[in-house]
Image (cartoon, coloured by chain):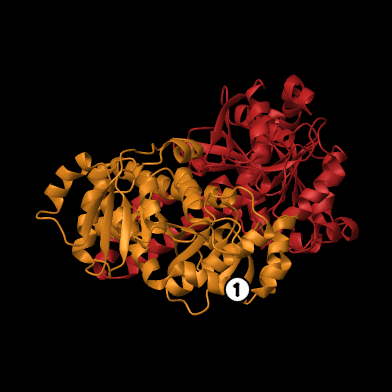
Chain colours: A red, B orange
């Protein structure tokens, strides 16, 4: 087991916890031969599920006991102080103890970020970690960060995000020279603010493939591979996207129920609707990276089902194989312009 | 003509100008008996179109000559200084001269905002005007502001936006007690920033129906009637929405072309697709209000077609009939808490 990449999994996190996570782990182990899992949580909750989903056990799976659970609405400071034996904390600790190469949790985002920063620390040259995720776009996907960890960002932090996004887009997704855009407002009188203008100047002088300011619709237009923004704007843009997609699909459902003609049309078009939904299915994009840390931490959506959670584990495995934190450190060292500007 | 509401229309603005605007005016005049139009622009460009679309002329239409045109990418300061006889400037002037009750332009947003502020000034108690629009939501629509006029806002400005949104939702759209939400990030460690927290405190003590913080997906969820945010976040959220909708419809188009089965499905489901698209058709929602001014100024989308531009004219007419600027002034005077807090 020691030579394989090892993924520590917070088995108690998320809205549904073990009943979703154990089958996801079982699927992952069946599909991916080249990795092992440390499942962290309360044995009493996990054992019956393990017996059911992984009959006869697996050589590539061990359970690590953790007595506490961080609740989904627990203040991060409380989780950090009072839940030192939580499944989340123990899973992150396993990285620092070199027993795991990455960790995946569907738990409380704020608590996970606080725990990961406290236990793992940030990479040299990175002020603050960020939350990054792939977003479906025309012809593929875009990587966007920060999605909510830092409400305020300095120009230097935004430039650091651009470095992190470039590494993930290049190394994990195989793009030769990822195009980076800074999210801004476009045609209006005051184009953005001082922070964004300064970040743009830093990026223009860096070695990154910086293409300039982009607007909200460019997140999905395929114009860039990496969209950089602060955590306030990024979080609102992400949730706005989810809201639009949900409203359109609900509108479709309502329209289908409206008459027998539309119900008939919907039956005929069912494969088409499925194909459209699959292309933008958030479960396919599950697994946000907490980038900028001394270690790989992947946040699954709290409401993820087993298929989605298994995708988050796969994201962790890819980042382990590519050595994302090391790559970020290396690329950052080469951006002497960014360092000088700090 | 003097007793009817008079709408001044910048006939030269927008990506397409008179060929789109003149037929829209013709449609508007045919459909709405109770309003007159002053069409502002170059007679030589307008006359052939007027002859074609409004045969024999109309008693409720006059042309006001303006020799210049503000281009779509002209810096607002240049438009203000060098284009004193532009169709946009002359149309806004008509309000100040009490020759028109409102003005509609599809031109350069920044230039229109700068011109309107310069010519009309803001209402007493309003620091800065904002751009507000209706956004399709589950079961109806939401009013969102600011959509891009003010990249930075103080807590007091956000509270003033809430007053303006409440008036438009109540008076123009007939809601008894519009629910107001402040756009913020949700479950993350740092919930928003000091500005938003202070704005929330102001609104909680006001007479408005303030329901608290809302997230990106609530713009469309129907949870609130008015969403208040700064112009940076609002502009990005708006353009993100447009981008998602566009991507989903383009994905649908691509999937339809993929095979004869899906083409057949699409034919069967065509009325269904049309119904869905109609419910979220941005042309139905065309006509953003520049609220907070001593006068009614409506901004049409630059790429609006005639149907969409006619909707923007209708929005102007409704605001005239309801006396929106007066209502905003009255409601603002009653929010003594907001005044004291400034």
Q: Residue at x 48, y 33 (%)?
A: A223
Residue A293, quarter of the rendered image: top right
Q: Would residue A263 be visible to someone looking at this image?
A: yes
Q: Is residue B311 above or below residue A336?
A: below
Q: Is residue B214 above or below residue A309?
A: below
In depth, the one of A211 and A243 nearer the eye is A211
Q: Residue at x 74, y 25 (%)?
A: A338
Q: Secondary structure at mark 1?
A: helix
In depth, the one of B139 and A282 nearer the eye is B139
In depth, the one of B252 and B186 nearer the eye is B186
The residue where tag 1 is placed is: B333
Q: Is residue A237 above or below residue A164?
A: below
Percent position (x, y) of residue B176?
49, 80
Residue A211, quarter of the rendered image: top right
Q: Would residue A64 be visible to someone looking at this image?
A: no
If the image is split into quadrants, where does the N terminus of chain B sit? bottom left
Percent position (x, y) of residue B105?
37, 50
């Amino acid at each position: 087991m020691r030579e394989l990449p090892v993924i520590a999994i917070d088995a108690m996190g998320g809205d549904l916890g073990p009943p979703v996570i154990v089958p996801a782990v079982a699927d992952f182990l069946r599909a991916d031969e080249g990795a092992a899992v440390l499942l962290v949580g309360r044995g009493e909750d996990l054992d019956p599920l393990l017996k059911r989903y992984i009959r006869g056990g697996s050589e590539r799976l061990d359970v690590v006991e953790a007595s506490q659970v961080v609740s989904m609405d627990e203040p991060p400071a409380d989780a950090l102080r009072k839940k030192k034996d939580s499944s989340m904390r123990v899973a992150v600790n396993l990285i620092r103890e070199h027993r795991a190469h990455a960790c995946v949790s569907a738990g409380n985002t704020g608590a996970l970020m606080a725990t990961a920063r406290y236990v793992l620390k940030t990479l040299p040259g990175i002020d603050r970690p960020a939350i990054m995720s792939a977003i479906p776009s025309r012809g593929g996907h875009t990587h966007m960060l920060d999605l909510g960890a830092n409400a305020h960002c300095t120009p230097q932090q935004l430039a650091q995000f651009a470095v992190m996004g470039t590494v993930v887009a290049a190394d994990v997704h195989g793009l030769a020279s990822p195009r980076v855009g800074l999210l801004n407002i476009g045609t209006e009188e005051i184009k953005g603010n001082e922070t964004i203008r300064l970040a743009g100047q830093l990026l223009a002088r860096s070695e990154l493939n910086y293409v300039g300011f982009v607007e909200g619709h460019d997140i999905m237009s395929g114009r860039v591979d990496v969209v950089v923004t602060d955590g306030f704007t990024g979080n609102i843009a992400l949730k706005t996207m989810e809201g639009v997609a949900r409203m359109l699909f609900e509108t479709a459902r309502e329209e289908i129920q409206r008459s027998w003609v539309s119900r008939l049309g919907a039956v005929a078009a069912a494969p088409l609707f499925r194909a459209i939904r699959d292309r933008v299915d958030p479960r396919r994009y599950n697994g946000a990276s907490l980038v900028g840390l001394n270690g790989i931490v992947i946040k699954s959506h709290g409401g993820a089902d087993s298929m989605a959670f298994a995708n988050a584990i796969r994201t962790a495995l890819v980042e382990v194989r590519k050595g994302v934190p090391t790559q970020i450190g290396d690329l950052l060292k080469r951006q002497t312009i960014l360092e000088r500007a700090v």
